Structures are given as C-alpha cells and as structure tokens.
Image (cartoon, coloured by chain):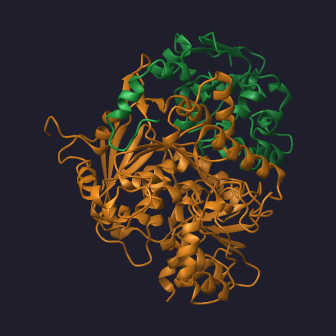
C-alpha cells in the first residue's frame, strides 16, 4: 500500500467467472484452518479450497474457460458469516478485483471496499442475464463502471447498485480509510473527552 | 413520537460521532477495541508500515482464543503456526503497551466471554473486534460491531472507524417461553422468521417480556447470533438486571461511583415513542426447542417438526434447500428428532458460559454418553472454568462420560486441534452450521441449545429435551 498517493477506482475491467448459489459464506470462501497465518500472503492459494476439492475439478475457479478472470459474479447474500477479511483477501490474491452479485453481506462488502474492490449489485433479471451470457461467452470483457453505476457486458449496459458513499470512496480514493480517519486530528480526542468511560491516553 | 425521543442506538451513535465524512459515512469513535490472535497481526503490520502508533492503547484489550488448544495449553504449542500467532500477539501487545489477558493471568478466554465477565463491556459503549460475533456485547446496551482486519488497522491508528448509519428494527418477543426452550432457541426462531440476510442494514433491538426476564448470559446468547441474521449489531436496553450483573466486576465502576453510573446507564435505554424503522413481534410461547438441519442458521426447525421438502418452500429458497439436503444427506420430510450424531460440542462464545454448563450438567446427570459419541465440554473462559470447578460440574460431566476441556473457541470453527472428521454429524451449541465449519470439509453441524446437545450425546441422536427428566 502506498503511503503517498490515493488510488482512485472508477472502473474495473476483466473477464468474468460465475459462481452460482446464494448465501455463500466466508467459511466456504476461506476455510478457517487456512487462517493460521500472521500475514495474508497464502490466502489466495486456498480460495474456495474445500468446495473445489469436492467439485473434483468442476468448480468454476478451476474451469479453464474462466482462467485469468478478474471479476467474480455471484448470487444473493454473498460473503455472509464471519467478518474475516481473509475472504476478500483470498479472492483478491486469486485474481479478482471486483464483484457483481445479487446482494452482499454487510461486513464482506465493507471489507472489500477497504481493499478497493468494488461490490456492485444487479437486479435478479439482469444478474441472470449476465450469468448466462458469461457462461456462454467467458472470453467477453466485463466492465464495472463505478462512476456510472453500470455493468457493461455483451448482454448490454446493466444498471448496477452501489451505495453513494461507497461510490465516492472508490472514486476519490478514500476507500483506504486510515488517512481519512486520521485527518480528523484532535477531533478524535475531543469526542473521547465527552465520553464518561474513556480516559485520554497518558 | 416526540422530537427528542431517541433509541439507545441513536444516543450511543450520536455520543460517539467524531464527524460526518464526505462519503456520507460517519467517523465513529470506538471506546473499546478488543483484539485476538487471528485478525490482528496483519493490522499491526499495516500500522507499522504506515508509521503510526496505536492511538488509544488504554482502550485496546487482547486475548487469545481461536487457536489455543483445549487439551494441552503448555508453551510452546505443539502446532507451530498456532505458536507463531500467539507469539506475534504477545509481541504486539508488549510493543504497543496493550493489556493482554493471557492464559497465565487467569483471565484468558473467548473474547466475547471475558469482556462481559471482566466488566469491560458496559452500557453505552461502542465496541469493535475483528470477529463477527462481537454483537454479543450488545446484551449490555452497548453498540458492538464485528469488523475486518483493515478496520482493525483503522481502529489501532485512529480509535475510530468509517461506518454508514444503520436502521433500527425492534424485535419484541412476547409471552413466556415453554420449559426446555432457551435463549438459543429464541435467536434461532428470530433468524428462521427474518432470514439470514433479513438484518442487512439494521441494528436489532431485542425487547419484550421474554428479554425483560432473561439473565445477562441469555441476552448475550441472543445478541451473539445477530450477525447470523445479517444484522451488523444487536442490543438489549440496559435495566436492573444489567446493573446487578456489572456490580463488583474488575473494570466496573468502584462502589463509590457505581450508583451514579448505574443511573446514567439506565437513562440510555430507548425512549418511549422513539422512531424505529421496523418493528417485529414474535410470540415467545410458540417457540420450540430448535435444531438446524441444513447449511446456514436459518435452516432450523422445532425439534418436533419435519425437515422441509424442496417443493414446500418459497421459490427463492428452493435451490438452497436442495443444496442443504444433498450436503447433509438428510431425507426431505424426515423428522429431525432421531437423527444420529457422532460428536457433541458444548461451548463457544454463544453458549460457553457458566449458565450453559449448568444446564448441560443437569442433563448429564440423567445418563451416560452413548458409546462411540465423541464429546467436548469447553468452558468459555478461565473464570467460567474456575466457577464450574467450584460447583463440581467437571465431575458431573466426567461421571457421565463427557470430555471436560480447557477454555477456548475449540470446535466452533476448528482453528485448533478440535475438529470433526469426515462426514461426522455434530450436535453443537455453537453458532454456525456452514459447510466445513467445524474443520472437516464434509462435516455436518446441527446447532441447538447446550441442554439439547447434552441430551443428544446421551441418546446418540437428536432428542426433544422436553422428554428428558
């Protein structure tokens, strides 16, 4: 992570990979036993590991037609369960830079934003259109246009949902929140001073 | 509705607002930051790289829970990776002057068990931890969030986080619970009704006669699983039960100041007539002892009910039900009672407190663990372990053939040696029945109350706790 420059994210482009199914939880994205690490370095190697083993090579992440995909296309309530940032870290390190789905679990969504990975939602109809289209033609380029709230693909320019605040964070580069928060300066201590249970650090 | 009437959520939010951010989010001061070995090491590495110190080391508290073995806890741990994580946590706490509730201190335990028992968790606080079950602390009328590692970094650096305001849904559970129905059954019933993503965008305020009567430990069990219903946090308004629980605990206000603090805590409760974005009422007298049958906590039913068939559920749920039936290898339409189990786990941040162990011990007195069933009874903390020992609970469990362990997260998520093997079915008092959650990629989990787990261990199958005694 660069200390000096803000990284602005207005579009993410790449080929897609479709993982169908609703309520895919973070234990499935990265099983807990692979989190016994003090860094995120190895997470990418274990993305969806158990699901892939069980699918015996039939999992979308092992499908050659999706090799090199940069955008993961998923169903409803993706990333539910644990707050582990290891989940988006694993997917990012596997190669995904953006997510398109029916809906996302809240903490997963926030963790993705904190890593500069946009999560955008489509209506059920458009999501189904996109999934079908990408399964038929996995080589097509997909664009997540954050500024315009659109997903552009062979199936057309689809209206995509992204909360206004998140959009701004990505466009301004303020998704990397630490510096934004530190900009508050002593407002932080002033807020703390008004709380009955907090003593300011010595 | 009066102009000034506010929910507890709104009062706490307003008091902790540092400023509005250009993104429309709020920069929210977090008064209590709890850390553990799994989600903090990367965050410490990030602030080292940024070159910023820990802003409020005096409001940051650490323990070790996920990776600690529950058999032999002597150092170094036999698992090198676990030992490395432990050493890293120790180093970070030392370097940054952070209080560490270590195993040697006698205060170690699951982060969501020790916060309350030390009196660290108090009404009106904002609390965050890199763990999704942080909502547990909401039982005290605190607003408590589970966060990811980047936010742990933000908190270390600025003791604040960027978060969009939440809506508030009041969930009133009325009437009286039937005998054999526990707090665990209440939250499973709530999730069943509202769905695993029904709470997205909401804080849940739990209220009504059932909550008024609950002990603090029962309230913690409910708040703990708020995230399983999609809610970012859940809370119960503070009352006299809250005040009495906090009296005399290590981090509670001293005697001289306690009465004044208690008065201020009670005043934080949601005002009559305040605005709620949604209100849901559930008849508590209709809640049955509940068991999950599928692959998320919303897949649960009363122990007397049959496992659903794909054609009887709504279209949007059908694929999920089919997937769950296939994974669990259960027959649609079959009774969940009578399902054979291989493993019984009593513990976790949901149900690893002294009252949970007492309820399970009552059942343990009625028989012996069925031959071939592996058992784990794991206190949630050193303090729970000590209390249980004083009450003679380990002897009761051992006499019935249960394996009594050292405190930790154990088999809830299997980041330690306690794991399912192969296709084993586990009756579990934990919080998640996701595929592979308990350490075996094909393992199966049935969530239920600790008493129901103990009964299942003895019967070797799922049984209705109301038929024991």
Across and down, in percent, residue B309 comes to 58, 60
Identify the hue of chain B.
Answer: orange
Camera-side residue of B222 and A193: A193
Across and down, in percent, residue B130 comes to 58, 42
Measuring 71% from the left and 57% from the top, which residue is drawn there?
B414
Identify the hue of chain A.
Answer: green
Q: Is residue A71 above or below residue B437?
A: above
Across and down, in percent, residue A111 comes to 59, 32
From the viewer's perspective, tell me whether residue A86 is left or right of residue B59.
right
Camera-side residue of A99 and B70: B70
Whether residue B463 can be seen here: no
Quadrant placement of the N terminus of chain B: top left
Measuring 68% from the left and 72% from the top, which residue is drawn there?
B405
The total of numbered circles placed on residues is 0
Q: Is residue B8 above or below residue B254?
A: above
Q: Is residue B313 above or below residue A152?
A: below
From the viewer's perspective, tell me whether residue A171 is left or right of residue B71.
left
Q: Is residue B433 above or below residue B17?
A: below
Measuring 30% from the left and 38% from the top, which residue is drawn there?
B10
Whether residue B353 can be seen here: yes
Q: Residue furthest front?
A: A202
Across and down, in percent, residue B204 comes to 38, 47
């Amino acid at each position: 992570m660069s200390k000096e420059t803000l990284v602005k994210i207005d579009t993410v482009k790449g080929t897609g990979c479709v993982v169908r199914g609703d309520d895919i939880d973070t234990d499935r994205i990265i099983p807990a036993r692979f989190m016994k690490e003090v860094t995120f370095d190895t997470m990418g190697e274990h993305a969806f590991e158990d699901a892939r083993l069980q699918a015996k090579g039939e999992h979308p992440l092992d499908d050659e037609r999706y090799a090199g995909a940069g955008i993961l296309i998923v169903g409803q309530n993706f990333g539910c369960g644990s707050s582990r940032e290891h989940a988006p870290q694993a997917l990012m390190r596997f190669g995904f830079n953006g997510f398109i789905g029916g809906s996302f679990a809240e903490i997963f969504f926030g963790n993705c934003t904190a890593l500069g990975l946009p999560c955008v939602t489509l209506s059920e109809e458009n999501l189904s259109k996109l999934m079908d289209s990408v399964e038929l033609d996995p080589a097509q380029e997909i664009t997540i246009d954050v500024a315009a709230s659109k997903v552009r693909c062979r199936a057309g320019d689809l209206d995509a949902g992204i909360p206004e605040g998140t959009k701004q964070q990505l466009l301004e580069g303020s998704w990397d929140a630490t510096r934004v928060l530190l900009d508050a300066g002593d407002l932080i201590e002033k807020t703390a001073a008004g709380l009955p249970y907090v003593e300011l650090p010595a | 509705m009066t102009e000034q009437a506010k929910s507890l959520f709104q009062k706490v939010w307003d008091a902790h607002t540092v400023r509005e951010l250009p993104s429309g989010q709020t920069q929210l001061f977090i008064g209590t930051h709890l850390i553990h070995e799994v989600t903090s090491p990367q965050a410490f590495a990030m602030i080292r790289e940024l070159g910023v110190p820990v802003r409020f080391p005096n409001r940051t508290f650490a323990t070790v829970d996920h990776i600690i073995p529950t058999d032999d806890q002597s150092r170094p741990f036999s698992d090198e990776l676990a030992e490395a994580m432990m050493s890293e946590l120790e180093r970070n706490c030392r370097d940054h002057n952070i209080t560490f509730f270590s195993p040697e201190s006698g205060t170690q335990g699951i982060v969501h068990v020790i916060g309350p028992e030390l009196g660290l968790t108090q009404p009106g606080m904002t609390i965050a931890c890199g763990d999704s079950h942080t909502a547990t602390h909401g039982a005290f009328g605190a607003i408590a969030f589970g966060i990811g590692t980047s936010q742990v970094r933000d908190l270390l650096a600025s003791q604040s986080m960027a978060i969009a305001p939440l809506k508030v849904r009041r969930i009133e559970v009325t009437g009286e619970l039937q005998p054999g129905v526990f707090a665990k059954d209440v939250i499973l019933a709530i999730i069943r009704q509202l769905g695993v993503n029904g709470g997205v965008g909401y804080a849940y305020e739990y209220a009504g006669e059932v909550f008024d009567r609950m002990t603090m430990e029962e309230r913690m069990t409910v708040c703990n699983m708020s995230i399983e219903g999609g809610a970012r946090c859940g809370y119960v308004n503070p009352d006299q039960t809250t005040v009495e629980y906090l009296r005399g605990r290590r981090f509670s206000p001293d005697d001289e100041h306690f009465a004044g603090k208690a008065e201020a805590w009670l005043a934080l409760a949601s005002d009559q007539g305040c605005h709620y974005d949604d209100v849901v009422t559930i008849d508590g007298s209709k809640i049955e002892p509940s068991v999950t049958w599928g692959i998320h906590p919303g897949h649960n039913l009363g122990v007397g009910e049959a496992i659903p068939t794909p054609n009887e559920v709504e279209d949007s749920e059908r694929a999920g039900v089919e997937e769950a039936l296939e994974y669990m290898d259960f027959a649609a339409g079959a009774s969940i009672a009578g399902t054979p189990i291989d493993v019984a786990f009593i513990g976790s941040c949901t149900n690893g407190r002294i009252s949970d162990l007492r309820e399970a011990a009552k059942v343990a007195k009625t028989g012996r663990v069925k031959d071939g069933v592996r058992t784990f009874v794991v206190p949630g903390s050193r303090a729970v372990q000590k209390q249980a020992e004083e009450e003679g609970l380990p002897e009761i469990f051992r006499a019935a053939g249960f394996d009594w362990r050292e405190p930790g997260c154990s088999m809830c998520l299997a980041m330690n040696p306690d794991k399912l093997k192969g296709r084993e079915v586990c009756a579990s008092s934990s919080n998640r029945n996701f595929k592979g959650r308990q350490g075996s990629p094909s393992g199966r989990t049935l969530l239920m109350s600790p008493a129901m787990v103990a009964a299942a261990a003895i019967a070797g199958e799922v049984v209705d706790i109301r038929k024991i005694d």
